[in-house]
Amino acid sequence: MKSVLAYRRDKEWLVLDGEGLSSLAAAANVETPEARMSTHAMRQWLIDYAPFPAKWINRLFSVGGIQWEGESLKLLAFPAAAKGSADPLYQKAAANRSGSQGTLVPELLYEDDFCAVFLKPVGMPVHESHPGQSGTLDEAVALHMLAKSDLLPVRHIHRLDDDTSGPVLYSKNDLAQWVLDEAMRAKRIDRRYIAIVHGRLAFQSGTVNAPIGKDRHTARRRVSPNGEQAVTHYELVETIGNASVVRLQLETGRTHQIRVHMSHIGHPLVGDRLYGGDGMLLPHQALHGERLLFPHPWTGLSIEAKAPSPAWLETLRDKLGSRTK
């Protein structure tokens, strides 16, 4: 969205007062809508001129979510998750909170009314891989929202492998989910990683453009001419003995993409036994999401969430350094 629209939140409602309505109209170079115009007319005005998905406006209209309060326009932008406290994710989080084994709530890197970014640790899955699985990041985020008594429909926008650490972006309402999903499809969400790979890179930087498909016989993915397009950019940070620290940027987001691509060019990640790495120094792949850049779903401004370097990464660097002495 090209302009910052002033709003205030009133529980489930997003309220556009005079300033917000004026800036909305100014962004479209049209007259400010008349206060208390019919909700049907206001719906059409929003579809024609507001920078919101039409399907979101139509959904609001269908549930009575476009209303006037004096001179202010109210939009039902922050309804609770379906069934509220009976939502399955919130039920699981509540049960976990009251049980003897609590789910760790990871470090919060960014949060506002529309979205949040959490730092996923190594070993924590983003979501259930089978019914009833606990200890996921989704569950931890729900636990965070329970603590705030704000049961919004939180949804992850992208994923990380279980044994990859780094920032994960969550939407907190339908508008944010639709806008951020579209940003992912349009490649406007920028994910940067750091990894330690075996061997010395021949070039300071490069790009791996190789399609990735499933291996029919194992849990691995592999470079395949019949796979989906996958593009990974890499840059050498430093060489430590017979290993290299590299920064990587994803242009696409295929399962295991970095792990497959680096193994494909002869530099598997340290610890990544699935793709040819040595697990003696680290029990998981040496891959960490350093930062996440995304367009804010309401303001359109670029938001950057930086993740601190994990202890395992620094320990691995020290081990590799000691080998060279």
Image (cartoon, grey):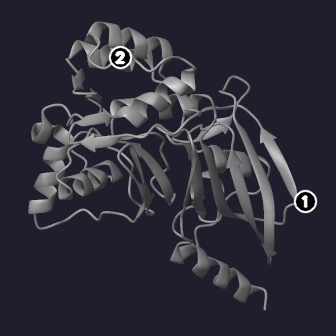
Q: Nearer the viewer, residue 76 or 201?
A: 76
User: Viewer-nearest of labels 2 and 1?
Assistant: 2
Q: Nearer the viewer, residue 274 or 312?
A: 312
Q: Residues within 10 Å of mark 1 (few under 14, many from 20)?
A: few
Please indicate whether residue 301 sits to the left or right of residue 114 in the image: right
Whole-percent x, y for residue 43 in the image: 34, 12
Residue 153 appears in view: yes
Q: CA distance from mark 2 to mark 1?
A: 65 Å
Q: Secondary structure at mark 2?
A: loop
Q: Secondary structure at mark 1?
A: loop
Q: Quadrant of the image for the C terminus?
A: bottom right
- Which mark, residue 102? none
- What's under tag 2, amino acid-wise? Glu
Residue 176 appears in view: no
- Residue at 65 percent across and 84 percent down: it is 318
- Residue at 48 percent across and 58 percent down: it is 163
- Which mark, residue 34? 2
Q: Is residue 276 above or below residue 157?
A: below
* Residue 241 falls in image quadrant: bottom right
Q: Nearer the viewer, residue 133 or 84?
A: 84
Q: Nearer the viewer, residue 214 or 47?
A: 47
Please indicate whether residue 39 sits to the left or right of residue 158 in the image: left
Please indicate whether residue 49 sits to the left or right of residue 258 in the image: left
